[in-house]
Amino acid sequence: MKILVIGSGGREHALAWALYNNGANTVLVTPGNPGTAEFARNISGDPVEIAEKESVDLVVVGPETPLVEGIAGLLAEKEIPCFGPSAECARLEGSKWFAKEIMAAARVPTATGKVFKNHSSAVDYLGEYPDKFVIKADGLAAGKGVYLPDTRRESDAIIEDLFKGSLGKAGTSVVIEQRLRGREVSVLAVCNGIDAVVLPPSRDHKRAYDGDMGPNTGGMGAICPPPDVPCDFGEDVRERVILPVLKVMKERGMEFRGVLYAGLMITEYGYFVLEFNVRFGDPETQAVLPMVESDLAVLFLAAAKGEDLPPLEVKEGASACIILASGGYPGSYSKGFEITGLEKTDSLVFHAGTAEEDGSLVTAGGRVLGVTALGEDIDEALEKAYLNADRIEFEGKHMRRDIGRTV
Ligand code: AMP
Ligand code: GLY
């Protein structure tokens, strides 16, 4: 099969790698990165035009923005199968309130919440105990739209900023919901509109520093599967969350074909959905896909066309991905530092923020590389991943040392 992957991060490197590695597939990536160039063809330009010109059999969309903007519809007009949902379906990620309404109709467990369109009603709702709530910009905010205030002063300032336009249109509606406490797990489901196959569960580590301290990042590492999660968890989430959501969406005229990512919190009262994404997680994908044995192209194409999904073969054991970030990330950081030591590694290394400059590999983003290793269990996977992460050098390199050790 000839497949075009859209995106340039670690997630897309892992997707392209799995599509290339697990089947007899030719992979193109737009725009891609120096890692994908090692086995795939990187092309720049308009993705729909590239897909048409190259007569690809399937397009796999990495990031949410093209999905929310309707790339699936543009590809459908050209009769090119797209693994990634329509703009209407992508509202499950593009509007937190839309997701809440669908969850209510599907009777999916989620935190109780309300939507607000103005400052005073939102502030009244929060009352004297803002630390019992989470404040969320309704729209897409590139991972910056969720706030967990501790004091009244903090929550007032957040609400005021959002309605003043600090996140643009994303914050003109604000969702406030009950704050849940527990362990977070991500479940990625490949959906064909009515049915789904779940990938093994994983766990991201969002804070910048050890002990879950410091600012939120795009993700500093992931493990798959989390050892504290029961082995039938994915199947349970498929039955209680994914399938009911697909059913309600279909009843409303929307067939979800692509990855539905459920971000869950396991609490003492059971598990709840915190959020949906309509794409693969980053860096979960870099930990999850190396655990898959099957040819993903066959699965993704069946999902894209709304056909029966083949079963998924998954490896025994566990995997861990450690992110190597630029010093200062997620705040400001410098770029252009030479990256050395890759030739000493004997695990998977997925590129995210890298570039080629005068024949050497240099840093070009906040999250630079993701080092993934597999093992018989999570301890072995982590040991190998850290061993390899230590072999790679660049000025200012920062990584968390406790991936897989916190929940
Ligand atoms: P994001 O992936 O940027 O939407 O951030 C979502 C993160 O906010 C989750 O991973 C949780 O850590 C946190 N979060 C979201 N909703 C809640 C909630 N109801 N209770 C507690 N934490 C939440
Ligand atoms: N790892 C979180 C996300 O991809 O949204």
Image (cartoon, rainbow, N blue to C red):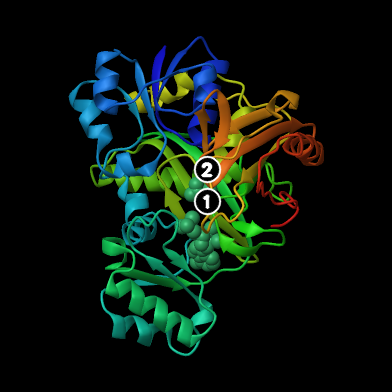
Pair 2/1: label in front: 1
- Look at the numbered discs 2 and 1 and tell me whether their residues touch, using CB distance below 8 Å: yes
Q: Position of residue 89 (x, y in %)?
A: 30, 44
Q: Residue furthest bottom?
A: 128
**Which residue: 48% across, 29% down?**
33
The answer to whether 113 is drawn above or below residue 208 in the figure is below
The three-letter code of the residue at mark 1 reads Gly
Q: Is mark 2 within 8 Å of ligand 2?
A: yes
Is residue 227 found left or right of 323 in the rendered image? right
Task: Count residues near mark 1 (Cα–Cα under 10 Å), then give few for <14, some for 14-19, many for 20+.
Answer: many
Q: Residue furthest top?
A: 24
The label number, if any, that marks residue 218 in the structure image: 1
**Which residue: 41% across, 76% down?**
158
The answer to whether 294 is drawn above or below residue 97 in the figure is above
Which image quarter is the N terminus in?
A: top left
Element type where label 2 sits in the image = loop
Q: Nearer the viewer, residue 33 or 69?
A: 33
**Which residue: 71% across, 59% down?**
210
Which image quarter is the C terminus in?
A: bottom right
Disc 2: which residue: 282
Q: CA distance from mark 2 to mark 1?
A: 7 Å
**Is residue 274 in view?**
no
Task: Count residues near mark 2 (Cα–Cα under 10 Å), then give few for <14, some for 14-19, many for 20+.
Answer: many
**Is residue 225 in view?**
yes
The answer to whether 284 is drawn above or below residue 209 in the figure is above
Q: Is mark 1 within 8 Å of ligand 2?
A: yes
Q: Position of residue 356 (x, y in %)?
A: 51, 28
The answer to whether 126 is drawn above or below residue 267 in the figure is below
Element type where label 1 sits in the image = loop
The three-letter code of the residue at mark 2 reads Asp
